[in-house]
Amino acid sequence: MSSFADPVPLPELVARARSGDRDALEELLGVIRPLLLRRCSRFLPYLDDAEEAAQDALVAIARNIGDFTGSGSFEGWITVIASNSARMTYRRLRRRAAENGVAELPETADPRTTSVMAGTRLDVMEALSELERSKPQVVEPFVLRDLGSLPYEEIAAITGTSLATVRDRIHVARKFMRSALTTRL
């Protein structure tokens, strides 16, 4: 028999954390940290940046756990927070680069100093920035589906739109991203 206690089921941890149980909140944050880091790593090219975004997401979740209503999945709720945190971290990095005299983050990654995966993520973030400027209403459904791996039905619930609208917006975003990424290569 193991000397470790059985892990508390996630829904129970969420419920206890929502009710103000600080120990449950700490345990919950420890349980979801790897998922948040994976979600943020899908956006950001460097582990340090992804960790910064994941930490920001953990703080946001801790502050706002009482706002989780349970109407959608907890994973969907934290995916929205992680996605927003990663995108804000990227914007902050771009701003820092501009303030430090670097005109802009590189358009494409230098293959001598950047892994293929990191370069691809930079291209995706730049294309997402372009998409956000031209078609902001399609960004959230696209991010939740293609980077957050949420089902269409849950995205419809999160965004408060119909399933048909979600599918259409994701289609429009994919078409835009495909074109934007193709021109970057």
Image (tube, rainbow, N blue to C red):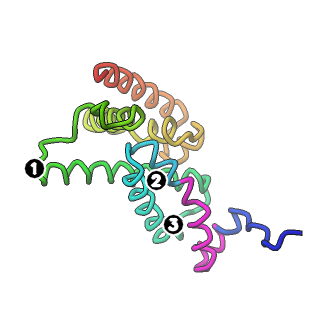
Which residue is at a point 56% across and 56% down the rendered structure image?
34
Disc 1 or 3, which lies upstream in sequence? Answer: 3
| Identity of the residue furthest to the front in this view | 112
Give above or below for 76 relative to 56. above
Disc 3 or 2, which lies upstream in sequence? Answer: 3
- Element marked by disc 1: loop
Which residue is at a point 50% across and 53% down the rendered structure image?
37
- Mark nearest the camera among 2 and 1 is 1
Give the residue type that dot 1 points to.
Gly
Q: Label 1, on which residue?
A: 101
Front in this rendered view, residue 53 or 130: 53
Which residue is at a point 27% across and 34% down the rendered structure image?
130
Residue 161 shows up from this direction: yes
Q: Label 2, on which residue?
A: 82
Give the residue type that dot 2 points to.
Ala
Q: Residues within 10 Å of mark 3 (few under 14, many from 20)?
A: few
| Identity of the residue furthest to the right in this view | 1
Q: Label 3, on which residue?
A: 67
| Quadrant of residue 154 within the rendered picture | top right
